[in-house]
Amino acid sequence: MSQSSDKPNKETYVSKIEELKLNRNGRSKMELAEMISLDIEKKPELAEKFILRPGSMDDVEKAFALFEACSKHMIGKSETTLSHLRSEWTSPGFSLERSVRVVESSAGELVGYIEVWDTHSPPVSVWVWGRVHPKFEDQGIGTQLMQWAETRARQAIDRAPEKALVVMRSGTFSHYDPGRNLLIDQNMTFVRHFFTMAIEFEQNPKSAIWPDGITVRTMNGEEEFRDVVLADRDVFKDHWGFVEQPFDEEYDQWLHFIRNDDKFDPTLWYLAMDGDEIAGISLCREESDEDPDQGWVDVLGVRRPWRRKGLGLALLNHSFGELWRRGKKSAGLGVDASSLTGATGLYEKAGMRTIRQFDLYEKELRPGKDLTKQAL
């Protein structure tokens, strides 16, 4: 955007950005409230305007590039893949127009992004996830995005059960001060740690020792998928934050993700069977999103009647062995650091160690009765 030799003023930039909004790609004019601007009095050398607008599928590659830049800045690795991002953006009930905002510079560069997830029924825990490019931090972009997200998240209140507590949740890597400070500045409160844990394969992992009467096999294609989702649902009803949603909605979401996952491999979905019943599951991926040499345990759980018998450790060791045989150098997973079922202790017993911590924050949008699982 051209500038005169005189000191830029707010009115000049408002006028130019309105013109830009009217003419870029034929988009309709946006409300002034959906515009982010720098404080040009404090930072005249950065006197550039940004547009906050709804996302679209045309943004997917630019958004992925933004996420990659942010991930490598924060943790030195990727966090997702382009395929996974496309799958998320097209998931059932999720609207880019309503639930995503991107921040675009006058040069057309995506420099910020936020999404609001209230697709689960009942929508009592609204998830917010966003990123600002490292080059554009400390300019108020993250603050404006979070303020938009809170306004959008509050739309879930009318769809939540009467007198139910409704919260907005978001999070950040524990070591990343800008992310933590942003959430605190938005009056969000820390509630929980989550760990990324990993194990290095220096030799063939320990063999699985199965409890009496238990056998293991892989999933028999999509015809058995409904049973797997039911088993997962049964397992995770004992996890912190769980709230039951209509099964058909949950099933459709699972089905969407596996059908749009170019790395989905049913031969890495292990079912621990007690006769015809699924006692436990270990659903793995040959590659984690952050490292192609690392396998990933997406879901691991044991149903109540089969707990405290060594089945979780057996499933984990079996999964490690299979990943090792496929040439993986390590395996990783994510876990609630204060897991109600003691999962962290199990993973440590299996030889895993914590490599990264993610902190969850929340803000109360409406007081009421907490419908989510908080304790066993």
Image (cartoon, grey):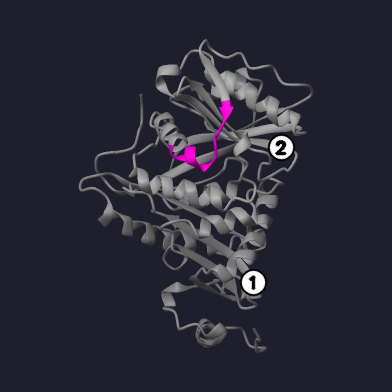
59 or 170: which is nearer to us? Answer: 59
Q: Does residue 296 lie above or below 61 as drawn? A: above
Where's residue 212, x and y in %? 52, 10
Q: Does residue 83 lie above or below 164 as drawn? A: below
Horizontal arrangement in the rendering, residue 369 relative to residue 175 (left or right): left
Q: Which residue is mark 1?
A: 109
Q: Amino acid at mark 1?
A: Glu
> Badge 1 local density, few (<14 within 10 Å), some, or many (20+)?
few
Horizontal arrangement in the rendering, residue 98 relative to residue 330 (left or right): left
Q: Which residue is mark 2?
A: 294
Does the magenta-highlighted stretch encompass residue 218? yes
Where's residue 303, x and y in %? 43, 24
Quadrant of the rendered structure where residue 200 is? top right
Q: Which residues are magenta?
A: 217-226
Where's residue 366, x and y in %? 28, 49
Q: Amino acid at mark 2?
A: Gln
